[in-house]
Image: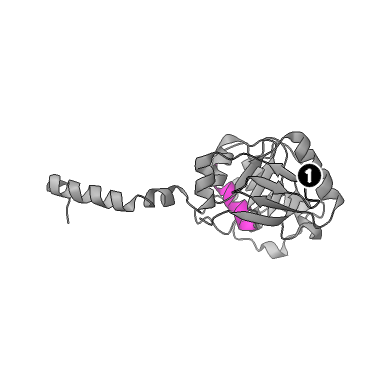
Amino acid sequence: MEAFTKLTGLVAPLDRSNVDTDAIIPKQFLKSIKRTGFGPNLFDEWRYLDHGEPGMDNSTRPLNPDFVLNQPRYEGAEILLARTNFGCGSSREHAPWALLDYGFRCVIAPSFADIFFNNCFKNGILPIVLEEKIVDRLFAEAAANEGYRLTVDLEAETITLPDGDVINFDVEPDRKHSLYHGLDDIGITLQQADAIATYEERRRKQVPWLFND
């Protein structure tokens, strides 16, 4: 998993509440567990004017000109600005996979669905919870200023605005450590690889009949 330390990125404002995981990545695209390749189908039903299916050439599909991510000013955005209860609905790790594959490393919202929130940290995305009035301000500024960028510093737990204002946010220490060092659940376990090997060797000597070499 790629570590998240400090990011200065373009902001894309998705002005919708209760965006569920089926909107983030529709169910027909959940046939792969490779973690990559889902970006072109992120928000598929909103981005395109036709119905998407796996294996389609997305470069030839008609785009919805009214959808925010199809507007040239938001091309290359790495920070997604969202509304309340983002990531609700069914549990699917494909949702953060799709966001990450598209290019988003950070999502800012007043609230998130719990499972989606946890899955973001496990896949290299920083979800930030801010008060609704602060999110309203960010939406207004992003709409009014083309090329609107924020600097997100995980270590300092700050967001720096273009005018120099600083917004603080909170991250639970264990999650912060894992994301800052790029450690998913497997990476955290592998930190104890020497202790695990020592235990296995001791057990091999104690109960050799359990091991078939």
Side (left or right) of 169 relative to 30:
right
> Which secondary structure dominates the residues rendered in magenta?
helix
**What residue do we see at 83% from left, 47% from top?**
141
**Disc 1 packing (10 Å; few <14; some 14–19; many ≥20):** some
Residue 98: say if magenta.
yes
**What residue do we see at 60% from left, 47% from top?**
126
Q: Which range of residues does the magenta coloring cover? A: 92-102
Residue 23: say if magenta.
no
Seen from the viewer's position, the closer of residues 24 and 182 is 182
Residue 175 in the image, given as x and y percentages of width and height: 52, 43
Compared to 42, does 127 lie above or below? above
The residue indicated by pointer 1 is 138
Seen from the viewer's position, the closer of residues 54 and 140 is 140
Q: Which amino acid is tagged 1?
A: Leu
Q: Is residue 60 visible?
A: yes
Residue 134 in the image, given as x and y percentages of width and height: 76, 38
**What residue do we see at 58% from left, 53% from top?**
4
Image quadrant in which the C terminus is located: bottom left
Based on the displayed image, in which of its 4 quarters is residue 90 positioned? top right
Based on the displayed image, in which of its 4 quarters is residue 171 positioned? top right
Q: How many marks?
A: 1
**What residue do we see at 35% from left, 49% from top?**
192
